[in-house]
Amino acid sequence: MTAGGDYHTFEAGDVALQSGVVFPSLRLAYQTYGKLNAARDNVILYPTSFSAQHYDTEWLIQPGGILDPTSYFIVIPNLFGNGLSSSPSNSAETLGGAPFPDISYHDAIALQRRLLAEQFGISRIALVYGWSMGGMQAYHWAACYPDMVERAAVVCGSARCSPYNHVFLEGVKAALTADPAFRHGCFVEKPVAGLRAMGRVYAGWACRTPSTGMRCGARPVSVRWKTIWYARGTAPSHGVTPTTCWPRSASGNAAISANVRNSAAIWTARSPRSRRGFC
């Protein structure tokens, strides 16, 4: 482990990716909040969303809040490509001039698992929580390592990128790469105009109506949402009813819900329907 600013870096070494390419000296940046208990089972994993770094999402971690660092050991792993973990912007020397390879969610989750196991000796996760692209990682965690994940909460996310989402992301990509700084497949300098154009395109996604891609009949997502999760079949004291996309398991493992201002998908650790088609 190495320190970098106010975060740490897990040095994973040379990693064979799902594509078959070997990424030399792959690095996973992360930050932790709270303390790991003696049993090493008070862990919440909180993957980053699209383009976000841990700085952008740590506001949800507050004493007395849902992600409470006084009770839980919270780990935010930075997704590859976000500028802190291995990314095109910091890997040119490592790759020796080769193009930055494709890194899948399968690759990302495998490295996050190595971080938890090798750095902290963690074999059990109380909750994997993710928003948007962080939610896609939460789905993969639940599907790939069901014996490790007790609970997973997905807010405004999907298990697979839909054709509609692909079209939208191509629009964002086209706006960004139209900048003159993008030459021969890479940026030679900061794409100022491209970033502004990308922001205009992405704003429409952030302000979309509930009919565009929202699941389970959820209402529009608010930036002031709160997530409520509760353990082993006990009802929340304030009477909020969970929005459930899949049935609870026979073993009665905990459900995780969101209040009426959220779009949330619920996964319970023993539901076989939740595990299909990822790994």
Image (spheres, rainbow, N blue to C red):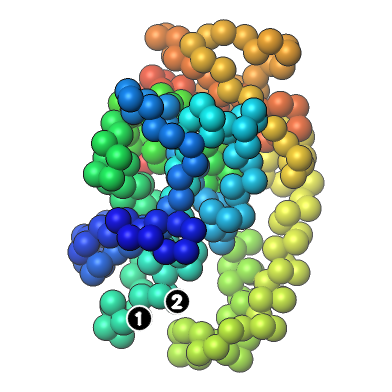
The percent coordinates of residue 162 (x first, y second) are: 55, 50
In the image, what residue type sits under mark 2?
Answer: Ser
Q: Which residue shows up at 64% across the image and 28% down it? A: 64
Above-or-below relation of 43 to 11 = above
Can residue 171 be seen here?
yes
In the image, what residue type sits under mark 1?
Answer: Ala
In the rendered image, which quarter is residue 28 located in?
A: bottom left
The percent coordinates of residue 29 (x first, y second) are: 41, 58
Left or right for 262, reference 163 = right
Judging from the image, what secondary structure is the residue with disc 1 in?
helix
Judging from the image, what secondary structure is the residue with disc 2 in?
loop
Q: Read off the residue under disc 1.
A: 92
Above-or-below relation of 251 to 157 = above
Label 2 Cα neighbours within 10 Å, binned few <14 / some 14-19 / many ≥20: some
The percent coordinates of residue 259 (x first, y second) are: 71, 26
Left or right for 11, reference 137 = left
The percent coordinates of residue 202 (x first, y second) are: 70, 63
Can residue 106 be seen here?
no
Q: Read off the residue under disc 2.
A: 89
Q: Which residue shows up at 63% across the image and 69% down it? A: 172
Q: Which residue shows up at 78% across the image and 53% down it? A: 207
The CA distance from mark 1 to mark 2 is: 7 Å
In the rendered image, which quarter is residue 45 located in?
A: top left
Q: Quadrant for the N terminus, please.
A: bottom left
Q: Which residue shows up at 69% across the image and 16% down it? A: 241
Q: Nearer the viewer, residue 205 or 70?
A: 70
Above-or-below relation of 154 to 205 = above
Q: Quadrant for the C terminus, please.
A: top left
